[in-house]
Amino acid sequence: MRTTRAVLGGLAAMVTVGLALTACSGTPEDSGNGGGDAPDGATEVTFWQSQFTDEENEWYESVVDAYNESQDEVHVNLTVVPADAWEQRMTAAQAAGNAPDVRTMNYGDIRDAARTSQITALTDLISEEAWSDLQENVLESVSADGEHFGYPMLVEPSAVLYYRTDLFDEAGLSGPPSSWEELIDYAEQLTDDQVFGMRLAQTSVDMSWSTWGYQWNVAGHLPISQDWSEPAANDDFAPLLQAFQDLFDSGALPPGDGIGYADATPYGEGEFAMMANGSWAASQLLADYPEIAEVTEVAAMPSFSGEPGETTATLGGWTWVVDGNSDVSAEAADFIEWSLGGDPENVVPFFEATVFSKVSPRQSVADVIAELPDVDSINPWNETIQTDIVPFAQQEPAYPWNVSLAMGEAIEAAMQGTPVDEALATANDKIATEIANSELAGTGS
């Protein structure tokens, strides 16, 4: 998590734990509001957004204000909820019957929320023109049983390789590693008493989601069968666990420092020669560590086969949904379409504010951004991310979190010395238990 920028990337928002409930009434003690006063007779729509960076929060407020000023029949009231309090405050609001009409939701939560009727199908409430503008693989990630349950706002690759060109030059390395075997070799060569060779996720929770792309790459599947009937944490994943173990044993991957995977601070402060992080890290490095950014290049994380163009990342991000009990679902959907699915100029400023470190799932928005004259000068890594990573990334899996956590715990255990086969067997047992306890069999795709 980008703690200094108050951001949780993609799935990270799903795993916030152990937080004090401060607003049992369901009305959050928000850190900012937007929307102003509703005109007489207007239908009011409540909107909760998770707290992001200051730049992102400003865009949310501005788009709400612009929508309210564009007409006088619907008035949106915006509330910003701290990311680390989201789950408990939303649960309290739902229990009290005053959940917001519109809220932000990550892709991984869509299917379960739809299955349990927490959110409303938007298929017929948003125009076909807006739906058809979306990338097909992203549209699938907000769909279930033939209905669309959220309108996607952005996607962001979970894994990008950031590497120091000055340190590569000193070590006589000509470019990024093309395979995990080379990654381990390079990391060992680059490790000295000043820097560590490689930064990866260092806790089981962060490993659980940040390694989805590596899991796809090494095994060709995820650790549960497609229909969620059988565990599949088998030996296909052994090279991934072995790689973490080898990096840790060599000293190129240090023990955990308490800083989350999504926070680029350790790399920005010069502690690492290479770092795996999401595309969002670009905005942090460019804003806070310009000297390190100047000697940084990016590439796709290497594949286990050594071949380019393989999946090594997943695409996470945020959608907007309408609550299943909203009495103003049509008005709420109108606001969503106006903000995210209408005029591209309403949403392009969001991507400008985040220095193009995130990707629009809408073709018309991507086309407008492509015509901007200074995208690559603002974010020098944009083209590589768009060309070499995004087209090959998979969508985040939609199965329950405990399945991902079982694999994250297996990777962490292997890194710390547990035999790889033993760690995988334990993960397989945990996933089998989750399938039984949550009655998952047959509920996958």
Image (tube, rainbow, N blue to C red):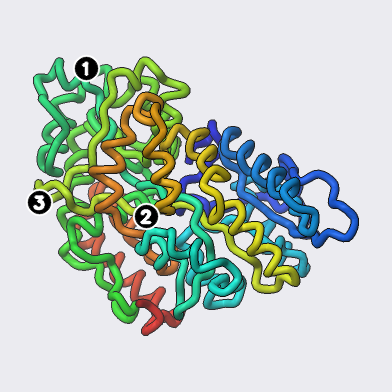
Q: In the image, residue 149 lies at what x, y percent? A: 53, 69
Tag shown at residue 419: none
Evaluate whether residue 245 shows in this view: yes
Q: How many residues crowd around disc 1 within 10 Å: few (fewer than 14), some, or many (20 or more)?
A: some
Q: How far is mark 3 from mark 1, CA to CA? A: 27 Å
Callout 2: helix, strand or loop? helix
Amino acid on which the number 2 mark rests in the picture: Ser
Tag shown at residue 208: 2
Amino acid on which the number 1 mark rests in the picture: Asp
Q: Which residue is at a point 31% across and 56% down the rendered structure image? A: 212
Q: Which residue is at a point 57% across and 77% down the rendered structure image? A: 116
Q: How far is mark 2 from mark 1, CA to CA? A: 32 Å
Q: In the image, residue 46 lies at what x, y percent? A: 74, 57
Residue at numbered disc 3: 305
Q: Nearer the viewer, mark 2 or mark 1?
A: 1
Residue farthest right in this picture: 40
Are the residues flagged by discs 3 and 2 in contact, CB closer than 8 Å? no
Q: How far is mark 3 from mark 2, CA to CA? A: 22 Å
Q: In the image, residue 164 lies at what x, y percent? A: 25, 23
Amino acid on which the number 3 mark rests in the picture: Ser
Tag shown at residue 166: 1
Reading the chain from its start, which is encountered first: label 3 or label 2? Answer: 2
In the foreground, 94 or 251: 94
Give the left or right position of residue 17, taking residue 414 as reference.
right
Reading the chain from its start, which is encountered first: label 2 or label 1? Answer: 1
